[in-house]
Image (cartoon, rainbow, N blue to C red):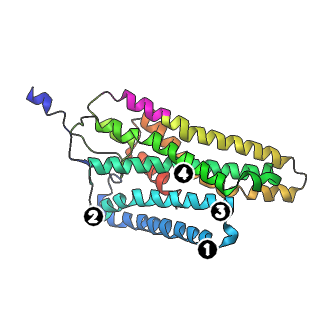
């Protein structure tokens, strides 16, 4: 009986993971992470400062950009400190409560990021497909209500993640696969049936990230249909140019997200290095 009891316990800490096999060059690896951190914080702060101080930028497109910048600031502040702690101070330990708190904010902010990209796609759709009604449709009060709805959605779908995990006992192999806490990573360490967590995690991904990306895709289908009907080649290119930066942001956010989700659930024998690199791109790329 004592042998069985030793296989299950609630550890005081989890251990975060760095890039495998690179322990001797941690200081050098920390330099690009420091640059990413400083660039993300300063760059997004300057965006917010410029939009706040310039009255001509108090328009829907720039309000959405400021909302995205706030979300990106949150992602940077939530994730990069634990990464730098590993590479600068070899601080790999994180308590259960700190891990669950970080997990909540990472998943919550990722859902908000997805929602902001969807709202920006809607902005481009209205601006190109129905420009005469742009000002009447995308009013600031309506944008505020949409933002509030997506914030409430993020809280509602993310809050069960730490609550579902707190009820588990955890095995002795309390080493995570990433430099921060993710729901799909922590749940694999539980000494219990995680079917409910798996199903709920997949359900949340479907109704948030996958649904948002589908709506963004449909928006661009309609945008492309409208643009191709423009007879002037220059006007066509000008309309498409207004979407380039948004499309790049969409690709940088969704491609690593989809890849990481599929790897965690269906390709568990994949290289740990691949998972870690994708997780860095997924959470550090958009703010940068």
Extreme residue toward the front, this view: 141
Residue 264: quadrant of the picture: top left
Residue matched to label 4: 113
Judging by the rendered image, the residue that carries numbered circle 1 is 53
Q: Which residue is mark 3?
A: 62
x and y, in percent, of residue 68 in the image: 56, 57
Mark-to-mark CA distance, 1 and 4: 24 Å
For the question of whether residue 254 can be seen, the reply is: no
Between residues 184 and 260, which one lies in front from this camera angle?
184
Eye-nearest disc, 2 or 4: 4
Query: In the drawing, does residue 29 fall left or right of residue 258?
Result: left
Q: Which residue is mark 2?
A: 89
What kind of element bears circle 2?
helix
Magenta residues (range):
193-203
Does the magenta stretch mainly form a helix, a strand or a loop?
A: helix
Is residue 46 rendered magenta in the image? Answer: no
């Amino acid at each position: 009986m004592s042998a069985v009891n030793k296989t299950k316990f609630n550890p005081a800490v989890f251990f975060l993971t760095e890039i495998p096999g690179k322990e001797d060059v941690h200081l050098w690896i920390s330099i690009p992470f420091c640059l990413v951190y400083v660039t993300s914080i300063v760059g997004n702060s300057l965006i917010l400062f410029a939009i706040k101080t310039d009255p001509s930028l108090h328009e829907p497109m720039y309000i959405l950009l400021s909302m995205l910048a706030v979300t990106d600031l949150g992602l940077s502040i939530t994730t990069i400190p634990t990464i730098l702690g590993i590479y600068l101070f070899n601080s790999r330990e994180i308590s259960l409560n700190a891990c669950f708190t970080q997990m909540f904010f990472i998943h919550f902010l990722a859902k908000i990021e997805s929602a902001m990209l969807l709202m920006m796609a809607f902005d481009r759709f209205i601006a190109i497909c129905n420009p005469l009604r742009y000002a009447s449709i995308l009013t600031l009060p309506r944008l505020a209500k949409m933002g509030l709805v997506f914030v409430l959605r993020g809280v509602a779908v993310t809050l069960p993640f730490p609550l579902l995990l707190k009820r588990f006992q955890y095995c002795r192999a309390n080493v995570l696969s990433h430099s921060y806490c993710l729901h799909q990573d922590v749940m694999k360490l539980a000494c219990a049936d995680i079917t409910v967590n798996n199903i709920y995690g997949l359900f949340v991904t479907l109704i948030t990230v996958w649904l948002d990306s589908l709506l963004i895709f449909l928006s661009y289908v309609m945008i492309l249909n409208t643009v191709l009907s423009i007879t002037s080649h220059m006007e066509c290119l000008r309309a498409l140019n207004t979407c380039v930066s948004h499309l790049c942001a969409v690709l940088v956010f969704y491609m690593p997200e989809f890849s990481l989700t599929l790897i965690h659930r269906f390709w568990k024998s994949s290289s740990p290095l691949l998972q870690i690199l994708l997780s860095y791109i997924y959470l550090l790329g958009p703010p940068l």
